[in-house]
Image (cartoon, rainbow, N blue to C red):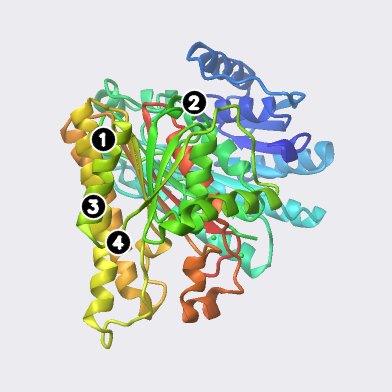
Amino acid sequence: MERWSGRVALVTGASAGIGAAVAYQLQDHGVHVVAVARRVEKIEEAVAKARQDAKSRGRYHETKAKPGKLYAKKCDLAKEEDILAVFKWIKETLGGVDILVNNAALEKESGITDAPTEDWRIVVDVNILGLSICTREAVQNMRGRGVDDGHIIHIGSVAGHNVGLHNSTMYAATKHAVLALTEGLRKDFLEHKSNMKVSCVTPGVVKTEFRDKLPYLKNIFDKKVGLYSEDVAEAVLYVLGTPPHVQGEAGLLDGDAVSQARRVLTVKEMNGEDRECVYLTDNMERWSGRVALVTGASAGIGAAVAYHLQDHGVHVVAVARRVDKIEEAVAKAKQEAKSRGRYHETKAKPGKLYAKKCDLAKEEDILAVFKWIKETLGGVDILINNAAIAKESGLTDAPTEDWRIVLDVNILGLSICTREAVQNMRARGVDDGHIIHISSVNGHKVVRHNSAMYAATKHAVMALTEGLRKDFVEHKSNMKISCVSPGVVKTEFRDNLPNYAVQFGKMPGLYAEDLADAVLYALGTPPHVQIHEILIKPVGEAF
């Protein structure tokens, strides 16, 4: 967050909950915060309370930055004149805005067949129109000042992915609209060859005044585990803190031209509530001395994940068909991160690295590795299902064997590893284990006709992620399952596919350590927060 110190952020809806938490966290990191709300008199009190609440939960972290200033301003997001007045004040007083956090939102407890028009209008005016006016004014201000590294962050909702309740349909419609506005702005930045970023953080149920003001929400969710405001605020800090080539969309994570990795970090609560949210943090201490299995570790993402975990004190069993390449690949991944200024020393005593041969297309290889782990290390606590195969072959002319190997590795191999890891954890009474699938943007859309079978397997991985989460809910387990879905990554995997390399070789791409950072983020969340998905693209990805 150092690069944001001394710069200016506008946070809407800052008189309570998420907005207040975002305001204090930005302020504590040296950002000057213009905090706006209709209830301007509540802002300073709310920001102070949010900071105190985080302290009471042991979630407050001191920073070395000189605190930024807090400017409380009155603004009703349903009134364009209020928004324009705030931006005029910012321009005249502070020069301009560098960060916009579109947090303000309204919800009315009303149906889609019997609600008064005015209830719908105010929700649309604040959640879509107000957000869009703020975004337009912020971007125009940045462009007018030659600022090309600004960041727009929309606070969305799980309701942007599914309509949970019939009497919140209009609210859900507006949050679906926010997702479209996020992607539309990303494509606007791409069209303008801009390095600005747009991210969307989409939380599930959060324990705030917003929930408590709606009786139907309070009655349904009052007894359930929910997120705290600082959970969402930390997600905001996470996307702001990504390198220039990575853009985070939290709901988000999603992330890919400057590697605009839209990170869609989708987080679900650990009580099994079937809703999504976003969270980010950095706490790997509890994994020190424990055991991780990383598949596909002889190159790229797998090698980067292996060294990241090892440097945080985790003992890593790194497997691949080319076992002779593993140690060299892990060392190379670490050296490349250092050369890019992306290597961070840790205080942990490094874990051990165990290189083992394993072909994920052969069940006997997988079972042998788990047997070795059990007999030698006791068991596994973390599983990173990274290994995957792609073949450049279509759906109408490809040999069956091409399809079979892709299915065997990407679906069956992943599933066998998952089954063996979970059974091992349950037999040892380990209830805080974490499974992480490395998937792909191809799990959301078919990018190329001659990679449709690969895309099919990655769509399957999305279903396997959600299915495992529901298995954990059924077993009342505190284990976690996460999925990291990257766009174009600059690795050997890409270079081994000639047509793919030609088509995407000149496009912006992520580095392997970007994905490893996402894995650490998911592993570092508190016990009550699960990152369900991180969809990460490079800034400027065209598709």
- Residue at 36% over, 61% down: 321
| Farthest-out residue, top | 56
User: Image quadrant of residue 3?
Assistant: top right
The answer to which of marks 4 and 2 sits earlier in the sequence is 2
The answer to which of marks 1 and 2 sits earlier in the sequence is 2
Q: CA distance from mark 1 to mark 2?
A: 25 Å
Q: Nearer the viewer, mark 1 or mark 2?
A: 1
Hey, what amino acid is under mark 4? Answer: Asn
Hey, what amino acid is under mark 3? Answer: Ser
Query: Taking 78 as reference, is 366 above or below it?
Result: below
Answer few, some or many: residues within 10 Å of disc 2's Cα (few below 14, many 20 plus, some between 14 and 19): few
Callout 4: helix, strand or loop? helix
Q: Nearer the viewer, mark 3 or mark 1?
A: 1
Q: Which residue is mark 1?
A: 375
Answer few, some or many: residues within 10 Å of disc 1's Cα (few below 14, many 20 plus, some between 14 and 19): few
User: Do the numbered discs 4 and 2 sit on residues whose CB atoms are within 8 Å?
Assistant: no
401 relative to 311 in the view: left or right: left
Q: Using the rendered image of the protein, determine whether residue 181 is visible from the camera's viewpoint.
A: no
Hey, what amino acid is under mark 1? Answer: Glu
Observer-nearest residue: 352 or 186?
352
| x and y percentages locating residue 148 in the rendered image | 74, 55
| x and y percentages locating residue 389 in the rendered image | 36, 67
Q: Which residue is mark 3?
A: 415
Q: Which residue is mark 2?
A: 285
155 relative to 427 in the view: left or right: right
Callout 3: helix, strand or loop? helix
Q: CA distance from mark 3 to mark 2?
A: 28 Å
Q: Which residue is mark 4?
A: 410
The answer to which of marks 3 and 1 sits earlier in the sequence is 1
Query: Taking 282 as reference, is 123 above or below it?
Result: below
